Amino acid sequence: YYNMGNTLIGLGKANEAIDCYRKVVELSPTYAEAYNNMGVAYKNLGKAEVSIESYKKALEIRPNYAEAYNNMGNALKGMGKGDEAVAAYQKALEINPNYIEARYNMGNTLSSQGRGDEAIACFQKVLEINPNHPESYNNMGNALKAQGKLEQAIECYQKTLTIDPRNTDAYYNMGNTLVDQGKFEEAVAAYQKAVEITPTYTEAYNNMGAAFKSMGKLEESIEAYKGALKFT
């Protein structure tokens, strides 16, 4: 039943997965993993509060279950409870200081709260453990950009692209940062790379249009806006 539930989650069949996990805990009430994965299924259904109850049940059975704390953090973040989410991620990291996913998630949550220095410290720690984690470089770039540290942000986006040359978000974010620096030609080149890789990236087309307009290239600007409108 447990393995079937996991497969059903992978297929996007969360309700059927929950039925399987319920059967597991009927047969084995101390099966912490089943409660944890039931929580994931509920979260996938948009039932964050119910998912948290499942994670709590998993943690009653196994208090040092780092994954359940991480998943609880994700659910709390989705509910807009940033401080509680950070506390859950911290519990996961007390159990396993090298838990990359929890450290990365905590960084994202701190960044969304405007706690840039703390977020950057999280991303740096992830990169100490795994130097090839492109998302941490990208999101560290976003945190640095929010602090006005534009050159450092661009360096982070470039590192993202060294690891993952097809990371469209890094190209897009780099384009936005170059616009902030008034480097419109370089920004356009970054947006063009983003839409080459992901032709439906409407935000990149839109911002490319604005960059062309700032350069006085109105025809090119209109063409870029048309690109955005194709996919809206």
Image (tube, rainbow, N blue to C red):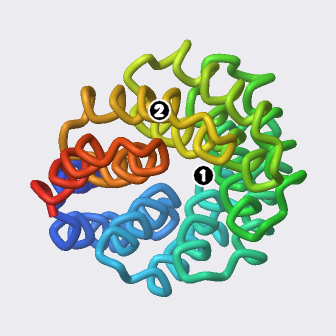
The residue furthest top is: 162
Callout 2: helix, strand or loop?
helix
The image position of residue 18, as x and y in percent, is 27, 70
* Res. 151 image quadrant: top right
* Dot 2 alpha-carbon crowd within 10 angstroms: few under 14, some 14 to 19, many 20 or more: many
CB contact under 8 Å: marks 1 and 2: no
Give whichever of 145, 33 is nearer the camera.
Answer: 145
Indicate the amino acid at tag 1: Glu
Q: Which mark is residue 171?
A: 2
Q: Position of residue 140 (x, y in %)?
A: 71, 41
Residue placed at 22% from the left, 67% from the top? 14
In percent of the image, x 70 and y 70: which residue is there? 85
Rendered-image quadrant of the C terminus:
bottom left
Residue positioned most to the front? 216
Numbered disc 1: secondary structure:
helix
Kind of residue sitting beneath label 2: Tyr
Q: Please say if 60 is above or below 149.
A: below
Q: Of tags 1 and 2, which is closer to the observer?
A: 2
Q: Is residue 219 left or right of residue 170?
A: left
Task: Out of 205 and 125, give the one closest to the viewer.
Answer: 205
Relative to 133, residue 86 above or below: below
The image shows residue 157 at horizontal and vertical percentages of 61, 29
Report the residue marked by disc 1.
Answer: 67
Calculate the distance from the C-alpha at mark 1 to the C-alpha at mark 2: 32 Å
191 with respect to 170 (left or right): left
Where, by quadrant of the figure, is residue 116 drawn? bottom right
